[in-house]
Structures are given as C-alpha cells and as structure tokens.
Amino acid sequence: MQLLEGKTVLITGASAGIGRAAAIGAARHGADVAINYLREDAAAASCVAEIEALGRRAIAVKGDVSDPATAADFVARAVDALGRVDVFVNNAGICPFHAFLDMPVETFERTMRVNLHGAYYMVQAAANQMVRQGQGGAIVAVSSISALVGGEFQTHYTPTKAGVHSLMQSAAIALGKHGIRCNSVLPGTILTEINRDDLADPAKRERMAARIPLGRLGEPDDLAGPIVFLASDLARYVTGAALLVDGGAFVNLQ
Ligand SMILES: NC(=O)C1=CN([C@@H]2O[C@H](COP(=O)(O)OP(=O)(O)OC[C@H]3O[C@@H](n4cnc5c(N)ncnc54)[C@H](OP(=O)(O)O)[C@@H]3O)[C@@H](O)[C@H]2O)C=CC1
Ligand SMILES: C[C@H](O)[C@@H]1OC(=O)[C@H](O)[C@@H]1O
C-alpha cells in the first residue's frame, strides 16, 4: 500500500541520516520529494538520484535553516518544481556535544538557531503554503527522546528538542482550523553522523544500547515508517501527538 501516493513532501536536513531515510521512505510510498540540506552537495544529489530511481520527482535545495530567508526560498522552489506542499518534515538539526559549565556562547546560540529557530521559520513557511492551497496538510517534526530527558553534554540541545515538541503542540492548535495536522517523532539514539564521535567510545555505546529493550541502537530507517505514517491519511485524526521511536529506551527505568 502506498501511503503518500500523489503527495509532495518537503524535508529539511535530508542529505544524510534520518532526513534522508524519511525522504526515500516517502518516495517509496509514492511521494515526490524536495530536500533541504546545508553542506553536502554530493550526498544531496545522491538522495535525489535514489528518489528518481524509484520513479518519483525530487529536487535538492541548499540552505541554512537558521536563516529565515531559507524557509521562504525552500518552499518557493519546491512549489515551482513540484507544484505544491502536502507534507512538511522538520528534521535538520545539530548536537555539538559539550559540557555545561564552559559552554561557548556561539555553540549554545548556533544550536538554538538551527534546531529551534530554524524549525519555527520552516514550519511557518510550509504552513502558509498549505493554507494558501486550502486543502490541509501534515507537518511532522523530528524532536527527540531528549525532549523528555536530559543529557550531561546536551544542555544546549535538549531544550531545543523540548521546544520543537512544544511547537508542534501549539501549531496543532493554530492550524487545526485549516486541516493541517502537526505531530512529532521522538527518536532515541539513532546511529548517524550527529553522534559518530560520541558513540566512538565503546563503553558509552554499550551503556546506551544496554538500556534499550529491543536490544540495539536505532538506524535512520527506523524513523521512516513512523514519519510516513504520521504524514499519511492513516493518521488523519492524529494531531498534537508525540511518538517515541526509541526501541523502548524511555520507559526502561529498571
Ligand atoms: N541521531 C540521533 O540519535 C537522533 C537525532 N535526532 C534528530 O534528528 C535530526 C536529524 O539528525 P541525524 O539524522 O541524526 O543527523 P545527521 O548529522 O546525520 O544529518 C543532519 C542533516 O541536517 C542537515 N543540516 C545540519 N545543519 C543544517 C542547517 N543549519 N541547515 C540545513 N540543514 C542542516 C545536514 O546537512 P549537510 O550534511 O548537507 O550539512 C544533514 O542533512 C536532528 O534534528 C536531530 O536532533 C533526534 C533524536 C536522536
Ligand atoms: C545525538 C545524540 O546521540 C542523540 O540525539 C538525541 O536527540 C538523542 O537523545 C541522542 O542523545
């Protein structure tokens, strides 16, 4: 069953990791896809090629989500190329691990600007396009288990993920009257570039894996299904919700 047949999906931060898996997952379910990315031209082009090989249309638009102008540009170029916006996935994010007491101001501010401000500008631009189209839509934000729990070296990061989760709750209220649903996914620890250095320490990696009832750290593709589901009409009465995708890590106290 193709859950996104005939839909156009926009995804930020989709040259790699979770965003890329979601982009390809959406294409497998029949969607045309526009991806945003920051630096990796070749990776973005290969994501586009993979989507086209599935028989779907795709474009890649380079831009820094922390710049408000990027949001308007991404949506406008996606509409030019693909015609409309049915689904928006806010995924781009960074997590430069650092201790709290000597957190550099630039690291704190950059993390806030990319993860939270970027989400705000992008969700707002996508929602305005959906309202103009007048046929509703679905917005899925990639928050995190870190919206609910802390991390010693993530004091700048976890508040952004709580903020994204909260943004989806308020946007669900603001946009319900337009038929636009807003939900978040809360991934646990997923093996990507964002945590490659952090998990290079075998002891930490084992400790993280040991608390997961399903017995392994996550892979980007573990997020594709939940994101496609929330984006699809199967979830037509789901809005303001948050779906943990963590192998059970959050509920595993003892
Ligand atoms: N991996 C994990 O364990 C978890 C991740 N998450 C969240 O998932 C999301 C994706 O992370 P993940 O796939 O792991 O990370 P990756 O580092 O693998 O991918 C990050 C993606 O975001 C893009 N990106 C980074 N900064 C910007 C920016 N300023 N503007 C536009 N694009 C940008 C990158 O583009 P490029 O490479 O081209 O520069 C890349 O495509 C993040 O929001 C993260 O917080 C949540 C919970 C757990
Ligand atoms: C990057 C981390 O490994 C990852 O990011 C999150 O949001 C999770 O909480 C993990 O800590």
Image (tube, rainbow, N blue to C red):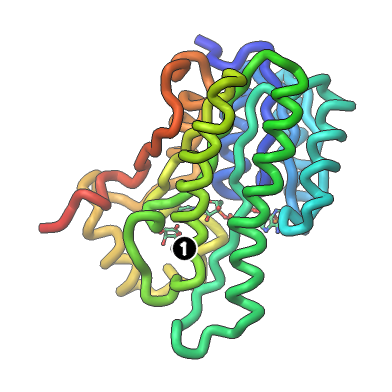
> Measuring 44% from the left and 63% from the top, which residue is drawn there?
158
Spot occupied by residue 143 in the image (x, y as percentages of width and height)? 48, 49
Q: Relative to 31, does residue 12 appear above or below in the rendering?
A: below
> Measuring 73% from the left and 53% from the top, which residue is drawn there?
65
Residue to which mark 1 is pinned = 159
Q: Is residue 235 left or right of residue 61?
A: left
Spot occupied by residue 23 in the image (x, y as percentages of width and height)? 63, 34
Three-letter amino acid code of the residue under disc 1: Pro
Spot occupied by residue 109 in the image (x, y as percentages of width and height)? 63, 72
Q: Is mark 1 within 8 Å of ligand 2?
A: no
Q: Nearest the camera: 56 or 38?
A: 38
State the image quarter where residue 6 is shown.
top right
Q: Nearest the camera: 223 or 172?
A: 172
> What SS does tag 1 mark?
helix
Say whether residue 54 is visible: no
Q: Relative to 213, does residue 184 appear above or below in the rendering?
A: above
Q: Is residue 57 left or right of residue 140?
A: right
Q: Nearest the camera: 17 or 102?
A: 102
> Measuring 45% from the left and 83% from the top, which residue is drawn there?
99
Viewport quadrant of the C terminus: bottom left
State the image quarter where residue 44 is shown.
top right
Q: Nearest the camera: 40 or 248?
A: 248
State the image quarter where residue 81 is shown.
top right
